[in-house]
Amino acid sequence: SHTHTPVPFSRSAIGTFFQERPLLTNSFTQDALLQAYLQRHLPEQQVQQDLLLFGERLVSEIEALGRQCELTPPVLQRYDAWGRRVDRILTCDAWTRLKHISAQEGLVAAGYERTYGEWSRVYQMSKIYLFAPSAGLYTCPLAMTDGAAKVIESLGVPVREEFKRLTTRDEKRFWTSGQWMTERRGGSDVSSGTETVARRQQDGWFKLYGFKWFTSATDADVTLTLARITDQHGRSTAGSSGLSLFLAKVWDSDGSCNGIEVQRLKDKLGTRQVPTAELLLDGMSAQLLSEEGRGVASIANMLTITRIHNTVCAVGTMRRITHLCREYARKRAAFGKLLKDHALHVQTLSRLEVETRAAFLFAMEVCRLLGREENRSASDRDTLLLRLLTPVAKLYTAKQAVSVVSEGLESFGGQGYIEDTGLPSMLRDAQVLSIWEGTTNVLSLDVLRSIAKSSGSVLQAFFTDERLQVAEASAALRPAVTSLHTSLSALKRFAQTAAARPTGALEQSARDLAYSLARIYMGALLVDHAAWENATHTDIYAALRWCDQDLCPVVSRDGAGCYDPQTAVMDTALVYDG
Ligand code: UCC
Ligand code: FAD
């Protein structure tokens, strides 16, 4: 009778079908573009071998540590058991392990050992790129550590011990650095936002008093920070020229804070692995690093490095999600076939792939330029391009990461929204990439600053890219090359008339200008890669796809009359309607 027929859903029987999870495998061997890029530019066997092993270590060890950091966020212990104020930031074991692994793998050190000459940064950043999506945001302290080392090196200041510790491979000696700029009054407008004062001590050191509103990886060993030096009457200079750069230890040797009270840890949308705190500086001992009044200009080197890290990590995240998406599409079926056999689904994934490729080449290009500068082999043009492209790459890839990860999550259907798949944290963590280290608009204005400061030479450098000429020989790439030339000419005309525009109009157009620079440059890089003798037909296809979009939004939007005093008035009316 029917009472004996086994039913698949009853009591403890929960059916027989289970989805297969997307499996993470060696992300170096999975990555065709990374391998091709290195084969072209840095074919050393040692590099291949190192990245291959690192790719294995990511799967077998690091991925689980990163996940543990997400699940065991840091906590603030304000008092000890006996009521004494201690302000300890307690991080999980995995966070400490990641610090050790970062040292062993030379994730900062490789940038300073310069084993591969001008390609040393490409080597270092290839590792950061692979590391980022598994690293539970340990990339955040690494970026700032790298930035601090760069500042110390470029200022040539005698803090050898600190420099050695920031750049060592010895896990027991390795130190990380913070970057404390943001105060309550402002993170973008640092010059008017900084209230922290520095009082000179008899021994030449300073004591800092102020309130830092966002400090990430507050468990760092040392930090760079900005403050205003006061005179004997307690007066200081307002604005940028009153700011100086300091180096301080965060913790005293007994584990207590160096004149710091941790007010609280931030309760954040993402980056929950990272301790981000509000700090009261109440007499923090610090050493002056920069010339007095040269604080912003001196920390600019740190900003360059951390913005490049941001770019590389954004691309790493995009690459990880596209890998997981394609892997999942091989296993998941709907409407009678695997997702990979639904042309529409694959077309969606191919868009993510094109975005990721363009972003990858852009990130590596900036690393290449940085490496050349540090190796003293940069031409004037390289130096100008590094200055121009650093903010462009940071702002553009951050936005791409949010949209690629968001679309990527959708490709897992409902599972993409489920916490214990580990997928949602990728979206949360991507969202910060466009906020910290300069928001999209603030970096767009930095692009204008770099143009103004070089009297337009950076744009000139941008327009004199000879690489397109090589590609012109290829019939297959012709449509891409043509649309790049068209966009370049349009951008050139825009730049020529920019100075004559009403004040403010250039600012209004800054974001579209930055996007135009990004899209055109990425197109040129894709074309250049596709014109390489060992390129494949997919490289050509990716270049054609990328260039078949609006490469120069600043002109197409300007055509609609988007930037003039009248539209500024209308924009305000629109935003504040009602
Ligand atoms: O968010 C933060 C940490 C997050 C954790 C790190 C994660 C890293 C990635 C990991 C990935 C997973 S730390 C906070 C970051 N804060 C910012 O990025 C600040 C954003 N605001 C700006 O960038 C503004 O543009 C300011 C603060 C730089 C503007 O300041 P001023 O004082 O108004 O700027 P001025 O007066 O235009 O420039 C002062 C000097 C000038 O040099 P001189 O005096 O020689 O003419 C400028 O040319 O600084 C120079 N300068 C630069 N130089 C300004 N910006 C730059 C630059 N980008 N490069 C070179
Ligand atoms: P605001 O400057 O108030 O910006 C608000 C909006 O106004 C933004 O959309 C911005 O684009 C726009 N805007 C501002 N000025 C202009 C302009 N002139 N033209 C057009 N638009 C403009 N800071 C540190 O110093 N150290 C850290 O370790 C650190 N860690 C952080 C960690 C996290 C998780 C987060 C979220 C932030 C962290 N920050 C840190 C702070 C971060 O750098 C700042 O939040 C950021 O620079 C923006 O500053 P703000 O918050 O004051 O925003």
Image (cartoon, helix red, strand yellow):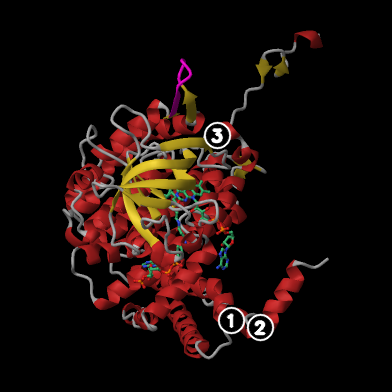
Q: Local crowd at mark 3 within 10 Å, few (<14), some, or many (≥20)?
A: few
Q: CA distance from mark 3 to mark 2?
A: 49 Å
Mark 3 or mark 2: which is in front?
2
Q: Main secondary structure of the magenta part?
A: loop
Which of the 4 image quadrants contains residue 234?
bottom left
In the rendered view, would you say 564 is above or below 154?
Answer: below
Left-right relation of 13 to 396? right
Mark 3 or mark 1: which is in front?
1
Q: Magenta residues, as a range?
A: 80-87
- 433 and 290: which is toward the camera: 290
Where in the figure is residue 26, as x and y percent of width and height? 35, 40
* Mark 1 in CB contact with mark 2 (< 8 angstroms): yes
Residue under circle 2?
Answer: 565
Which residue of the protein is positioned furthest toward the front in this rendering? 233
Disc number placed over residue 505 in the picture, else none: 1
Where in the figure is residue 250, as x and y percent of width and height? 35, 39
Q: CA distance from mark 3 to mark 1?
A: 46 Å
User: What residue type is disc 3 on?
Assistant: Thr
Residue under circle 3?
Answer: 421
Earlier-in-chain disc, 3 versus 1:
3
- Residue 400, can we see it? no
Disc 1 Cβ-to-ligand 2 distance below 8 Å: no
Disc 3 Cβ-to-ligand 1 distance below 8 Å: no
Q: Secondary structure at mark 2?
A: helix
